[in-house]
Amino acid sequence: MADKIRFIPDQTDPARLYKLVAGLVVPRPIALTSTVDAQGRANLAPFSWFNAIAADTPHLCLSIGEHPGGRTKDTLANILSTGEFVINAVGESIATRMDACAREYPPDVDEFAATGLTPVPASLVRPPCVAESSAWFECRLVQALPLPRSSYTLVIGEAVAIHVDAGAIDARGRIDMAALRNIGRLAGNAYCRLDQPFSLEHDSFNRYGPHP
Ligand SMILES: Cc1cc2nc3c(=O)[nH]c(=O)nc-3n(C[C@H](O)[C@H](O)[C@H](O)COP(=O)(O)O)c2cc1C
């Protein structure tokens, strides 16, 4: 066994802690999240403390911190005010524009207009979807849980509609990862591609048929 270095979070510098957690839990999927405010103005921002947490009734979660200085992020304010959000997949072709959405714009700036991404109406919720994304999850808020000893709020949503590019799903429902070209977040400014997937043989995972 390799020697380990132990960190006790309460005794560790916050910047070091961030590097530790963000660098060790990798790769993280990215939720490019669209919301609207009470006046219907759109907002778009990426979140990588993000995952799917249930599939029978599909649920997704993301964890939203504060802007430096403590201002509430527009995404969280909008989700709390409207109860709705859309999670848009992030493929390589929109990586730069996804990153541009993370700039600290004032609340009245529409990141669709600022980055040139194209809004298209969702089917069941008010926030628009991103036309350039290969998959969309239209979500309704289930719970927003402020983490007791953190500035982050865990947002859990139920996906009430899921859309995927017709060319990225086959007749048996299998998703073509190569067609999605999703990217993952590593630490700092680093990202990864899904270009070298591999398979393990494990029959018990085949309840719904082999994948891929
Ligand atoms: C790839 C990527 C992932 C990010 N993940 C998160 C995250 O999980 N939680 C968070 O609070 N901020 C995250 N951010 C930062 C937010 O996107 C950024 O603070 C943004 O300005 C928030 O916008 P808003 O105020 O419009 O909601 C991430 C940024 C990038 C580029």
Image: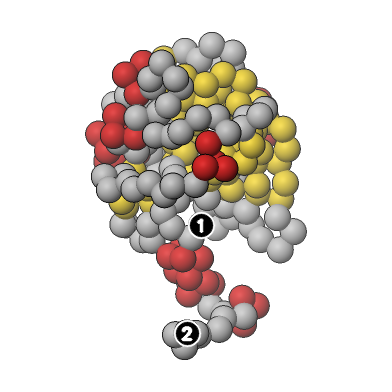
On the rendered structure, is 106 left or right of 195? right
> Which mark is on residue 68?
1
Look at mark 2 in the image and give the residue it sits on. 1
Q: Which amino acid does label 1 sit on?
A: Pro
Q: What element carries label 1?
A: loop
Does 202 appear above or below 165? Answer: below
Q: Which colour scheme is used?
A: secondary structure
On the rendered structure, is 182 left or right of 163? left
Q: Earlier in the sequence, mark 1 or mark 2?
A: 2
Give the image location of residue 184, x and y in percent: 37, 47
Note whether ligand 1 is within 8 Å of mark 2.
Answer: no
| Front residue of 199 and 56 | 199
On the rendered structure, is 41 left or right of 175? right
Q: Looking at the image, which residue is at 46% across and 22% down?
A: 173
Query: Which quadrant: the C terminus?
Result: top left
Q: What residue type is labelled 2?
A: Met
Q: Residues within 10 Å of mark 1 (few under 14, many from 20)?
A: few
Does residue 135 show up? Answer: no
Give the image location of residue 133, x and y in percent: 36, 27
Does 15 appear above or below 167? Answer: below
